[in-house]
Amino acid sequence: MVGRLIAIANQKGGVGKTTTAVNLAIGLAAHERRVLLVDLDPQGNATSGLVPGSRFAQLKNSQRTIYQSMVGHYVVEAVLTQVREAVYLTPAGPDLAAAEMELTTIGAREERLARILATVREDFDYILLDTPPSLGLLTLNALVAADSVIVPLRCEYFALEGLGSLLDMLRKVRCEFNHVLEVYGFALTMFDTRGRLSYQVAREVRDHFPNKVFQSVIPRNVAIPESSSHGLSVIEHDSGSAGAQAYREFAAEILSHSVSRGECASRQMALPNRQSWSLDVLLDSGKRNARRRSHSNRGMIRRPRN
Ligand code: ADP
Ligand code: MG
């Protein structure tokens, strides 16, 4: 059984890629899956999101980063760090910024990551790739290596802006390097139940990509930035928070897809049958609220106070 390799990509920064990668890793591990998280962003946010500050400083300046493996100094096994019982990390540090340039002189530069990860695929159920906010060589390597891509979209104006370039890149990668690559799904993040904007954006995305939007929606939740400042997922930091609940549901949704595809079918699954952060439920309640608002408006117009 080889692990499923999932890239988490969107060339925009601040859309929830790293948060999704970190919480998905912990959420999948809670279901007894072995997970490797590959930090491909020179900022090292996935690394700092999983380890406390002192250890992060030590890791990012160590010689055991994903960069060292990508440019050929170490095999990938040598740069794995265990961060939880079933979660491993290949850390990133500022040295990775140089990789974009150095890789240009190395043969098969687009396939570097796919090649180095091939030796550890059988050791993990899932390998998650957290990509930087650009469509450069590091993201290209992630797409060439991956089986599928999760695209986080922040529920705000212009959520879909610029997505065309990522989809173009996916098409090119599929043609030239990786025929099996598919969009796993679009993950709606930072959903704000106050106001109408998030509802509108969610509806627009669902209309644009029918059947490709995950049911699990991630709410805007203050426990999430708090958790990363402690080097923890929100699931560990505040397990009762809305953010933790939503990411647990997201991990369960990914597992249920794997089961329906026949992967990992031998293991017992305990998936929630009711989701509280479900896209359909949110959009239905959004519609009801809008109707209620328009009824009460009508009432106000018909029966003005005098
Ligand atoms: P990216 O990796 O796409 O740049 P991040 O995952 O680093 O995005 O998120 C950007 C910032 O937004 C971080 O400070 C993170 O803690 C915060 N954030 C992410 N998701 C949420 C959320 N659902 N609610 C509140 N803050 C969030
Ligand atoms: Mg990031």
Image (cartoon, rainbow, N blue to C red):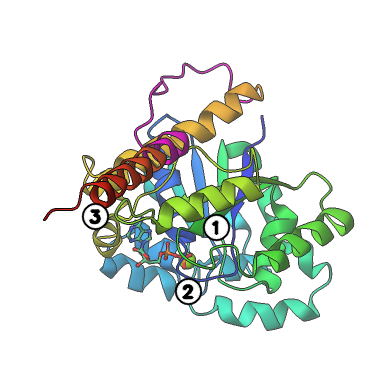
Q: Which residues are magenta?
A: 263-285
| 276 left or right of 258 in image | left
| 81 left or right of 132 in image | left
Nearest the eye: 144 or 275? 275
Q: Secondary structure at mark 2?
A: loop
* Disc marking residue 206: none
- Disc 1 or disc 3, which is closer to the eye? 3
In primary-sequence order, the first of circles 1 and 2 is 1
Q: Position of residue 156 (x, y in %)?
A: 45, 63
Q: Residue at x 23, y 41 (%)?
A: 239
Q: Position of residue 163 (x, y in %)?
A: 65, 64
Residue farthest to the front?
Answer: 306
Q: Residue at x 37, y 34 (%)?
A: 30
Q: Secondary structure at mark 3?
A: helix
Q: Secondary structure at mark 1?
A: helix
For label 1, the residue is 78
Please, is residue 209 above or below residue 75 in the view?
above
Q: Quadrant of the N terminus?
A: top right
Q: Residue at x 64, y 37 (%)?
A: 211
Please, is residue 129 above or below residue 95 in the view?
above
Q: Is residue 220 magenta?
A: no
Ligand 1 positioned in quadrant = bottom left
Mark 2 belongs to which amino acid? Gly
For label 3, the residue is 223
Mark 3 belongs to which amino acid? Ala
Q: Quadrant of residue 162?
A: bottom right
Residue farthest to the right?
Answer: 176
Q: Position of residue 54 (x, y in %)?
A: 27, 69
In primary-sequence order, the first of circles 2 and 3 is 2
* Disc marking residue 93: 2
